Image (cartoon, rainbow, N blue to C red):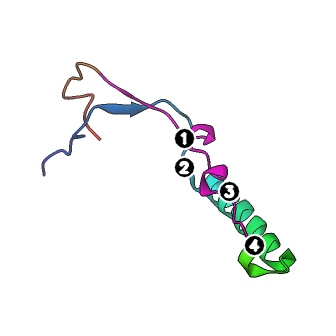
């Protein structure tokens, strides 16, 4: 059986296992806000939904960073 290798030498610099809890929390906040806007609206023509960029900012996520690894050896690229 052959060994698998990374195709691009990018390494994450974080200790977080996953972004899933953060994404769940942010999507929950967004859905809650949208529900509030819909239920409190008197006229649906005037409803303005929040921008999706207000929730789940990639730069504040626990697993947000990667950097390019220059001159990697074969051992560094093994998965």
Q: Which of marks 2 and 1 is nearer the N terminus?
A: 2
Which dot marks residue 46? 4
Q: Residue at x 74, y 72 (%)?
A: 47
Q: Distance between the residues labelled 2 and 4?
A: 38 Å
Q: Which of marks 2 and 4 is nearer the N terminus?
A: 2
Q: Mark 1 points at which residue?
A: 63
Q: How many labels does the image show?
A: 4
Question: Which label lies toward us, 4 or 3?
Answer: 4
Q: What stretch is highlighted in magenta?
A: 46-69
Q: Earlier in the sequence, mark 2 or mark 3?
A: 2
Which dot marks residue 29? none
Between 33 and 6, which is closer to the camera in this rendering? 33
Q: What element carries label 1?
A: loop
Q: Earlier in the sequence, mark 4 or mark 1?
A: 4
Q: Which residue is drawn at 71% across and 68% down?
A: 31
Q: What element carries label 2?
A: loop
Q: Residue at x 56, y 35 (%)?
A: 15
Q: Is residue 48 left or right of residue 58?
A: right
Quarter-of-image position of residue 79? top left
Q: Distance between the residues labelled 4 and 3?
A: 25 Å
Q: Is mark 3 on a helix, strand or loop?
A: helix
Alpha-carbon neighbours of circle 2 within 10 Å: few (<14), some, or many (≥20)? Answer: few
Determine contact: label 2, label 1, CB under 8 Å. Answer: yes
Q: Which of marks 4 and 3 is nearer the N terminus?
A: 3
Image position of 12 with respect to 33: above or below: above
Q: Is mark 4 on a helix, strand or loop?
A: helix
């Amino acid at each position: 059986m052959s060994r698998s290798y990374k195709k691009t030498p990018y390494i994450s610099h974080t200790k977080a296992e996953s972004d899933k809890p953060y994404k769940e929390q942010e999507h929950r906040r967004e859905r809650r806000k949208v529900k509030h806007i819909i239920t409190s609206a008197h006229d649906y023509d005037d409803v303005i939904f929040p921008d999706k960029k207000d929730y789940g900012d990639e730069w504040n996520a626990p697993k947000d960073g990667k950097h390019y690894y220059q001159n990697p050896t074969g051992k560094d690229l093994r998965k």
